[in-house]
Amino acid sequence: MATECSFDIVSKIDLQEVDNAVNQVKKIIINRYDLKGTKCDVAFDKKTSQIQINAEDKMKYETLLGIVKERLAARNVSLKSLKLNSEQQALDGSIQQTIDFQMGIPSETAKEITKMIRDSKLKVQAQIQSDQIRVTGKSRDDLQQIMQILKEKDINIPLQFTNFR
């Protein structure tokens, strides 16, 4: 009798890597010629998992946002997980923005993923378990094909495959 094989589909980010990227951005702000001596700042709140960007003007804001994205990508934090909140402009012309992170798979996206798995016609089952999806099947090859199908699809959140058994 064949045993059941399974894996989990999750969407998580490493908050320590986010913190490291923000610390790198702070060093860049201190040393970069166009940002040196300005009131530009980047902060990471570990409790709320938010990045706060403060810049003097629109041009410095766009530069700072580009540096933040570049450092996050260099630390293997997917840019698909970023949720940019609306910019807030102060009276003095400075711009503030918070960046949230998408953690976990939203229910709408989970339903789309399970539909893709069903449409593949492979002999596997997908179950939504709160903010992750468990895929089970008798054949490891079928599970690996599901992973390949999901990697090829354009899903608006980063996916990781864990607990492959």
Image (cartoon, grey):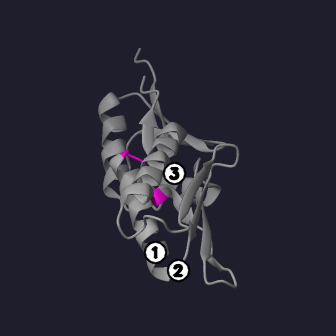
48 or 40, nearer to the observer:
40
Q: Residues within 10 Å of mark 2 (few under 14, many from 20)?
A: some
The disc at residue 57 is 2
Magenta range is: 75-80
Q: Amino acid at mark 3?
A: Thr
- Residue drawn at x 38%, y 70% as measured from the top left: 34
Q: Quadrant of the C terminus?
A: top left
Q: Alpha carbon of mark 2 to alpha carbon of mark 1: how far?
A: 6 Å
Could one spot residue 165 in this view of the protein? yes
Whether pointer 2 and pointer 1 mark residues with C-beta atoms closer than 8 Å, the reply is yes
Quadrant assignment, res 47:
top right
Residue for badge 1: 60
Q: Residues within 10 Å of mark 1 (few under 14, many from 20)?
A: some
Q: Earlier in the sequence, mark 2 or mark 3?
A: 2
The disc at residue 114 is 3
Quadrant assignment, res 153:
bottom left
Q: Most extreme residue toward the front, as rendered? A: 37
